[in-house]
Image: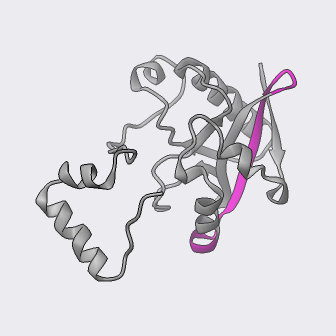
Amino acid sequence: MYHFKKIEISDIPWDKIESCYDHIVFKSKAWVGYLIQNKKITPFILGIYKEERLLGYFIGSKFKFIFTVIASPFEGWTTPFQGLSMVDSVSVNQRIEIYKELIQFLFKSGECSYFQATDFQLEVANVAHSTLKYEIYPSYILDLTPKIEELFRNMNSGARRQIKASQGRGIIIRST
């Protein structure tokens, strides 16, 4: 059985969240800051525990629409994935169990009336055999770890043209 602890905005451990094995930019301090500034959302972060051991975090936002919503993310945020950030690798079925208990916690505690999450670690086959309600949204994930030259070589000419046009308008592309 999992339990969840709400983390106040001033106490969000961004360094720990950003060191999780399944971390992506859309769960970072910088991206959440962008959402706060441009989408006027309030971060909603929970620690996920089993017994007293920290397993990870739920990264999302809370806002009032007609009713209280917790979303990770919500449509229109230009954010494709958020969801769980786990300290150690967990199976898809464990993620599903965490979501089931998380949803029960959120509704029983009165935190929200509507919940949604988009998590790139979930697999349709596993979710389809669970009690979770789901929708499939097509997406594309690009591995940015190769060198820039290799990424450009693998792009079609239209994509290369758009990037060169963006550079001409002042966008800087660099690798770190």
Is residue 45 rendered magenta in the image? yes
**Residue 132 vs residue 77, the one in the foreground:** 77
User: Measured from the top left, where is residue 84 in percent x and y?
Assistant: 62, 37
Residue bounds of the magenta highlight: 37-53
Q: Residue at x 41, y 64 (%)?
A: 174
Drawn side of residue 103 relative to residue 81, left or right: right
Count of numbered circles in the view: 0
Q: How is the image coloured?
A: one colour
Q: Residue at x 82, y 45 (%)?
A: 6
In this rendering, the answer to whether 30 lies above or below 73 is below
User: Measured from the top left, where is residue 173 in percent x and y?
Assistant: 37, 67
User: Measured from the top left, where is residue 120 in percent x and y?
Assistant: 47, 37
Q: Residue at x 72, y 49 (%)?
A: 15
**Residue 43 vs residue 169, the one in the foreground:** 169
Residue lying farthest to the right in this orientation: 52
Q: Is residue 131 visible?
A: yes
User: Measured from the top left, where is residue 102 in percent x and y?
Assistant: 70, 33
Q: Residue at x 58, y 24 (%)?
A: 96
In this rendering, the answer to whether 165 lies above or below 148 is below
Drawn side of residue 5 relative to residue 40, left or right: right
In this rendering, the answer to whether 156 lies above or below 51 is below
Is residue 176 rendered magenta in the image? no
Q: Is residue 69 visible?
A: no
Drawn side of residue 25 relative to residue 164, left or right: right
Location of residue 22 (image quadrant): top right
Residue lying farthest to the bottom in this orientation: 169
Q: Quadrant of the N terminus?
A: top right
